[in-house]
């Protein structure tokens, strides 16, 4: 057994670097955070060979005074906190004081700075070298701010260098860090260069329109076009940003940016709340996209739980979870077809001649159309001449009325327009002022029926079903404690239980709609959720799944003929129903093709 020895400063820093400096992207993150904490509003990043040969970050922040330059490269040296009170109320991105020391221990680091407090014309440069990491100071010409140059990363730790990927991969990681930082501070100008080639130049964004443009540059214009802007404030919490429509989903969870007081995080509580908000509208196996900002008192969130500060801990996790869920759930429910409709002011107004090929429509009087419920039209008698049928005449009149309405310049046309035909007994073809809408009638009616059934269930409140024979379940002591402490919460979910022993509970009542489901597994899942997140939506999820199945069977089926008034009644119901853009399984219920898009398909005007 060796004697206990004090580790050298370099070895201690290299061990700390294992936590903080994983790859060039980790270095970029730490240096960018320091620049933002220094109050910089212009940051430039210059890379060579994916950041391995050179990673330079230059800012116009407050700078570092000469006497503090060498100290800045020491472990646990920081200007951001001084006592325990500061640690409990952190407002800066960095605060541990380990980044520069760790980076300098595995690279050739030089730092040039001029402080705003310095009256001299020149700045100062500090470099570290040798086994003891002695810092050398020298005067240098430098504007106000700081430049950190990191060269030859992991040159003295070849084992770590072997784990680096290709130049392209390492650059893509830094590019992702750059994008995260650019989205965290709209008021800062960010510039990125790689191998003397300009990659990004993002100007400061002060107005909402400019911020939206930066989001489009970082996340792609398709995300902004298919997203909803939200801004909700309640109980000292504020959530704002952009969330994608359910139809704009991803196969991977790669377009998800969540910030807490300007710090990007990956938190399972946040992920669960967002996933729960999208549960009813997202296709299985797909992931939502979002850029969201949560602002709250720094004292009620602990950011000092992970070396890289990617995780946080909320003091009242249930409050935060419920706030995120309710805000997003409401925002997605309030999306209407008119919100999603792409405006096309350049589209010319269609004349009746263009629609019908004759002047017949202009001569027909407009027939007032009341919203009708969906019903099966009466079948014609065998052998009846269709041309003489009253139903056929009414159908023609309905069609002409729609055409006249659409061709009128001052007529107000609903977002989903008016039905003009039914295709293969499956799709409704509708027309509005701007183009063509195709509706999957079964999927649309399924969502309408489902939402009505959910509303009816909520109005009747949750009915409970006493179990003829109480069900005893063996659980862990932690789950039993949770069930005992959260009896009131579980009763609100329709579950009445009591503790039987240290590791057993007895279920006496469950929601009546779920009496035939696997009660034991459901209770275990609910307790697991309450332990993890402080709440559970399992009961609601099971109930919604049953209502969804019932709605599916109760909706209009394919190959069923609908009249024009019935199709229009369905379109009006869609416009008035929450989440009508998706069926119960997350599939889209309608798509829109503008006149411009149709012209491109047929090469008109080219």
Image (tube, rainbow, N blue to C red):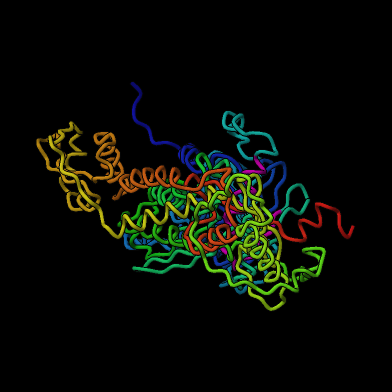
Residue 160 coordinates in the image, percent (x, y): 57, 32
Q: Is residue 191 magenta?
A: yes
Q: Which residues are magenta?
A: 170-192
Q: Is residue 318 above or below residue 236?
A: above
Residue 531 coordinates in the image, percent (x, y): 27, 44
Image quadrant in which you'd find residue 367: bottom right
Image quadrant in which you'd find residue 48: top right
Q: Residue furthest right?
A: 606
Residue at 70% of width from left, 70% of height from top? 404
Magenta residues: mostly which secondary structure?
Answer: helix
Q: Is residue 575 above or below residue 476?
A: below
Residue at 21% of width from left, 44% of height from top? 510
- Taking depth in this image into account, of 450 and 51 the one nearest to the observer is 450
For residue 390, side relative to residue 231 (left or right): right
- Taking depth in this image into account, of 366 and 425 the one nearest to the observer is 366
- Taking depth in this image into account, of 449 and 488 the one nearest to the observer is 449
> Which quarter of the rendering shows the N terminus?
top left
Residue 455 in view here: yes
For residue 315, side relative to residue 257 (left or right): left
> Which quarter of the rendering shows the C terminus?
bottom right
């Amino acid at each position: 057994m060796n004697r206990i020895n004090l580790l050298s400063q370099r070895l201690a820093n290299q061990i700390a670097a294992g936590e903080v400096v994983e790859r060039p992207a980790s270095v970029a993150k730490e240096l960018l955070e320091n620049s933002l904490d220094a109050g910089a509003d212009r940051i430039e990043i210059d890379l060579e060979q994916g950041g391995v040969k050179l990673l330079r970050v230059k800012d116009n922040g407050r700078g570092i005074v000469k006497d503090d330059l060498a100290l800045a490269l020491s472990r646990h040296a920081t200007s951001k906190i001084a006592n325990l009170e500061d640690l409990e109320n952190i407002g800066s991105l960095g605060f541990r004081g380990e980044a520069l020391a760790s980076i300098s221990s595995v690279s050739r680091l030089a730092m040039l700075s001029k402080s705003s407090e310095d009256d001299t014309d020149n700045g100062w440069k500090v470099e570290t070298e040798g086994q003891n990491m002695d810092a050398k100071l020298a005067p240098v010409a430098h504007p106000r701010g700081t430049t950190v140059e990191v060269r030859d990363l992991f040159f003295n730790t070849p084992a770590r260098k072997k784990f680096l990927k290709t130049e392209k991969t390492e650059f893509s990681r830094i590019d992702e860090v750059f994008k995260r930082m650019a989205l965290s501070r709209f008021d800062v100008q960010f510039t990125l260069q790689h191998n003397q080639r300009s990659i990004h130049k993002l100007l400061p964004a002060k107005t909402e329109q400019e911020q939206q443009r930066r989001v489009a540059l970082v996340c792609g214009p398709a995300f902004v076009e298919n997203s909803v802007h939200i801004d909700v404030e309640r109980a000292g919490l504020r959530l704002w940003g952009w969330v994608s429509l359910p139809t704009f989903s991803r196969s991977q969870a790669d377009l998800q940016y969540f910030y807490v007081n300007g710090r990007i995080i990956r938190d399972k509580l946040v992920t669960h709340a967002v996933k729960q908000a999208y549960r009813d509208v997202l296709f299985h196996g797909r992931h939502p996209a979002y850029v969201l900002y949560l602002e709250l008192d720094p004292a009620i969130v602990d950011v000092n739980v992970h070396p890289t500060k990617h995780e946080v801990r909320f003091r009242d996790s249930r409050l935060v979870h419920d706030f995120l869920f309710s805000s997003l759930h409401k925002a997605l429910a309030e999306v209407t077809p008119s919100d999603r409709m792409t405006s096309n002011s350049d589209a010319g107004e269609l004349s009746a001649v263009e629609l019908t090929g004759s002047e017949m429509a202009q001569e027909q009087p407009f027939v007032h159309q009341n919203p009708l419920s969906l019903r099966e039209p009466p079948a014609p008698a065998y052998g009846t001449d269709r041309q003489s049928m009253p139903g056929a005449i009414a159908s023609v009149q309905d069609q002409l009325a729609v055409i006249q309405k659409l061709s009128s310049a001052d007529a107000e046309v609903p977002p989903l327009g008016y039905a003009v035909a039914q295709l293969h007994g499956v799709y409704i073809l509708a027309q509005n002022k701007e183009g063509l809408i195709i509706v999957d009638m079964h999927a649309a009616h399924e969502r309408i029926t489902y939402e009505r059934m959910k509303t009816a269930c909520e109005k009747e409140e949750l009915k409970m079903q006493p179990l003829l024979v109480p069900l005893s379940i063996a659980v862990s002591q932690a789950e039993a404690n949770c069930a005992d402490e959260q009896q009131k919460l579980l009763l609100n979910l329709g579950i009445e239980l009591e503790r039987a022993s240290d590791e057993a509970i007895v279920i006496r009542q469950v929601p009546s709609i779920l009496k035939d489901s696997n009660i034991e597994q459901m209770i275990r899942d609910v307790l697991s959720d309450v332990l993890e997140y402080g709440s559970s939506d399992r009961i609601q999820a099971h109930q919604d799944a049953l209502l969804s199945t019932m709605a599916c069977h109760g909706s209009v089926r394919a190959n069923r003929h609908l009249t024009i008034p019935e199709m229009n009644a369905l379109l009006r119901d869609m416009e008035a129903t929450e989440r009508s853009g998706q069926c119960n399984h997350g599939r889209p219920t309608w798509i829109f093709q503008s006149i411009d898009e149709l012209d491109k398909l047929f090469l008109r005007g080219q």
